[in-house]
Amino acid sequence: MKRLLCFIAALLLINYFSNSQIYKTIDLTTSGTLSSLLSNEEKRNVTNLTLTGNVDTRDFKCMRDEMSVLSVLDISPRIGEDGGGVATCFAGGDGTYGNPYQISNASELAFLAQQVNDITSETNRYGNNYSYGKYFVLTANIDLNGANNNWTPIGNNASWEFNNKFQGTFEGANFEIQNMKVDVSGNEVYLYAGLFGYIGTESIIRNINISASCNVKVTGYGVQMLNFAASVVAYNNGLVENCLNSGSVSAVTDDSN
């Protein structure tokens, strides 16, 4: 009887640890550094990851290739004129043609980026992207506070295996994106820099104005780089119409390393 009780206790302990959730929060002051900030043990065991700061393609690939048990991802860049991070919902709407999701501030726009870019999402992994067939509309000018924050583009196509492309309809309603800073760099084959990083064939982006206060830059290190930079959409497989850019855009390949 004593042996049986010991055996049951051992099974309970094994079950407890196998189902335990390991949480980790990391502030990425420099994009592309996630792998170096995690220990090997953390890469094997962390199930719930919260990221703040600057996230790029290299960080998404670290999560995909090195964090095998990661199941919950919360990307909360420090953006917004109010210093807020990522909203938990939109200002209104249900994502349909007649009642699009309403985006009224930087935090809600970051929420869209978070949902589209999430590689742990079952929808993004095995089906169409979160944004597929949905409608979004700006209801105000959006200040992305670029003096303090690096914008993470909406849609990144970090992996051909996962569907991280934006696949919806985004109506800018002639409102303006202000103080957007996008600075993407790395030695990945594909780098995308813009308000939207990568949009799919089903996408429509229209009536967005990019102010003169916005700056977009992509820098690739290597001789075989495909770097894409644009104010509104870096890589376009859909339709972009009636958008105006007054900001600066640059793409650089540095093969000195």
Image (cartoon, grey):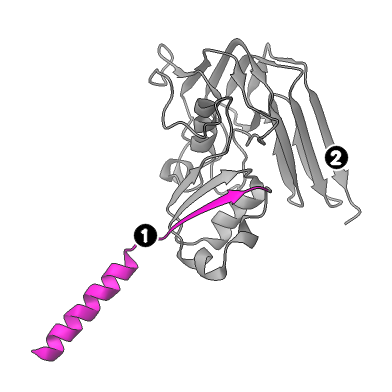
Tally of marks:
2
- Relative to 151, does residue 27 appear above or below in the rendering? below
- Residue at (31% x, 64% y) in the render: 19
User: Is residue 13 inside the magenta stretch?
Assistant: yes
Of badges 2 and 1, the one in the foreground is 1
Mark 1 secondary-structure assignment: loop
Residue 242, x across and y down, in percent: 68, 11
The extreme right residue here reads: 256
Image quarter of the C terminus: bottom right
Residue 166, x across and y down, in percent: 56, 31
**Where residue 252 is drawn, which disc sits there?**
2
Image quarter of the N terminus: bottom left
Horizontal side, residue 227 vs residue 208: left or right: right
Horizontal side, residue 166 vs residue 100: left or right: right
Residue 206, x across and y down, in percent: 62, 15
Q: Which residues are magenta?
A: 1-29
First in residue order: circle 2 vs circle 1: 1
The extreme left residue here reads: 1
Callout 2 touching callout 1 (CB < 8 Å): no
Give neighbour class at mark 1: few <14, some 14-19, many 20+ (Cα, 10 Å): some
Residue 208, x across and y down, in percent: 64, 15
Look at mark 1 in the image and give the residue it sits on.
21
User: Is residue 125 inside the magenta stretch?
Assistant: no
- Residue at (19% x, 79% y) in the render: 9
How far is mark 2 from mark 1, CA to CA? 42 Å
Label 2 sits on what residue type?
A: Val
- Residue at (56% x, 69% y) in the render: 40
- Relative to 29, does residue 16 appear above or below in the rendering? below
Between residue 123 and residue 17, name the one nearer to us: 17
